[in-house]
């Protein structure tokens, strides 16, 4: 099939929607499909067939720094659509200035598939999304297949846009994370090494690095920190200096390291090195790509914030969900896992099995099934070799 993956934002950013598009696009191309990226302000030169349809401006939304596109010219949109796309796959919610124009101008023979990604954290973000849904509700009639990355995202989409869909999770290429876990298990730490706790993510309030420090501070005041403990807060963001001060205030300055930005190719090894991966997001998550990566990579236990998006990923592992706003309860869960290596190893085995359902090989086949169904809805037969339609998860 010839597939156009449409995203309003730049593919230069490492956020979850971009990871979805890039992972799916690479997998589709590896299966022999002709993949085109319809995007904005993308400067990277390692992707084939990228068409920048607009320029972006930076905004804040749902606790993140995002960019939104300016007006995409009709000529540029028509040139992209003249490629004869079988499927136009749009990431949702979308701007009326770029993806909205692509949908409006898409030929009737092109199947329009959308994937809904967000679960807003703040009242302002929820209100803005509902307003956008009211404006774009008529355009949903053009959708031939509607997907959402989690049940929580699908429920919010139904309320905001008046359209329901099938749950198809974000695809994750698990291969490097599996390999990192195998290597970490084969190269067990020495008996004298203390436990290692790793946080990997943006250093912004909602990702919960501060909550992790608060919980560790509780243990420090109780004299319950294990000997040789090492804590790694990896990532960049506006809260870095505040977190450095917080670590010092909790008496953790000699325990906590801030290595900064971690390249994509180094993430798996870092996660695999941890006895505890702590990802205590406070909310605003529609899914948890970072959680899936940790589940696949960690030789120890993954503790995740109890929010709807992460809960969808941690099905069957609910005993590892934590309330990051309750420092005492979070500290108790940390302490129990810090003290029990056998418990961590047992969790690691369960986690690795649970992560497999999110592998791109599994999710990619499900997406192809929905493409085939969308083509049927558009009055076309899927090209030879496309997967038959299958029910959503």
Image: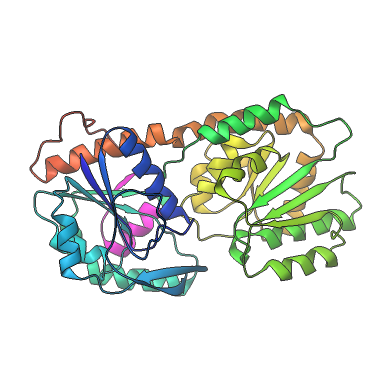
Residue drawn at x 13%, y 44% is 377
Q: Which residue of the protein is positioned furthest toward the top in this rendering? A: 186
Give the image location of residue 146, x and y in percent. Answer: 26, 50
Q: Nearer the viewer, residue 273 or 26?
A: 26
The quadrant in which the N terminus is found is top left
Residue 159 is inside the magenta segment: yes
Residue 375 is inside the magenta segment: no
Q: Is residue 375 visible?
A: yes
Please, is residue 348 above or below residue 152 in the view? above
Q: Quadrant location of residue 282?
A: bottom right
Q: Is residue 317 visible?
A: no
Please, is residue 35 above or below residue 184 in the view? below
Residue drawn at x 88%, y 49% is 224
Give the image location of residue 237, x and y in percent. Answer: 62, 66
79 left or right of 268?
left
Magenta extent: 153-169
Please, is residue 58 above or below residue 106 in the view? below
């Amino acid at each position: 099939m010839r597939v156009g993956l449409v995203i309003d934002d730049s593919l230069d950013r490492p956020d979850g929607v971009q990871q979805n598009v890039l992972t799916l696009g690479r997998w589709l191309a590896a299966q022999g499909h002709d993949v085109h990226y319809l995007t904005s302000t993308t400067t990277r030169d390692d992707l084939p067939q990228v068409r920048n349809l607009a320029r972006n401006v930076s905004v804040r939304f749902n606790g993140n720094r995002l960019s939104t596109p300016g007006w995409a010219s009709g000529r540029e949109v028509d040139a992209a659509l003249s490629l004869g796309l079988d499927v136009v796959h749009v990431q949702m919610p979308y701007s009326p200035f770029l993806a909205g124009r692509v949908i409006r101008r898409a030929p009737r023979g092109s199947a329009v598939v959308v994937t809904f990604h967000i679960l807003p954290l703040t009242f302002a973000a929820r209100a803005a999304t509902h307003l956008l849904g009211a404006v774009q509700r008529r355009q949903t009639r053009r959708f031939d297949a509607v997907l959402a990355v989690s049940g929580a995202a699908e429920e919010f989409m139904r309320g905001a846009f008046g359209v329901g869909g099938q749950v198809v999770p974000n695809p994750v290429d698990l291969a490097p994370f599996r390999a990192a876990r195998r290597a970490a298990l084969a190269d067990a730490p020495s008996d004298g090494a203390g436990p290692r706790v790793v946080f990997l993510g943006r250093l912004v309030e909602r990702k919960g690095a501060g909550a992790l420090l608060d919980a560790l501070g509780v243990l420090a005041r109780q004299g319950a920190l294990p000997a040789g403990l090492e804590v790694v807060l990896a990532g960049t963001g506006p809260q870095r200096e505040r977190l450095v001060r917080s670590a010092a205030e909790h008496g953790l300055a000699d325990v906590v390291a801030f290595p900064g930005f971690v390249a994509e190719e180094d993430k798996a090894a870092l996660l695999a090195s941890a006895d505890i991966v702590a990802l205590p997001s406070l909310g605003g998550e529609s899914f948890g790509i970072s959680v899936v990566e940790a589940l696949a990579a960690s030789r120890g236990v993954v503790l995740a914030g109890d929010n709807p998006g992460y809960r969808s990923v941690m099905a069957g592992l609910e005993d590892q969900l934590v309330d990051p706003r309750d420092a005492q309860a979070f500290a108790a869960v940390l302490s129990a896992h810090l003290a029990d290596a056998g418990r961590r190893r047992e969790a690691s085995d369960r986690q690795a099995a649970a992560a497999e359902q999110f592998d791109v090989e599994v999710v990619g086949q499900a997406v192809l099934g929905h493409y085939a169904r969308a083509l049927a809805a558009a009055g076309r037969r899927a090209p030879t070799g496309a997967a038959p339609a299958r029910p959503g998860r």
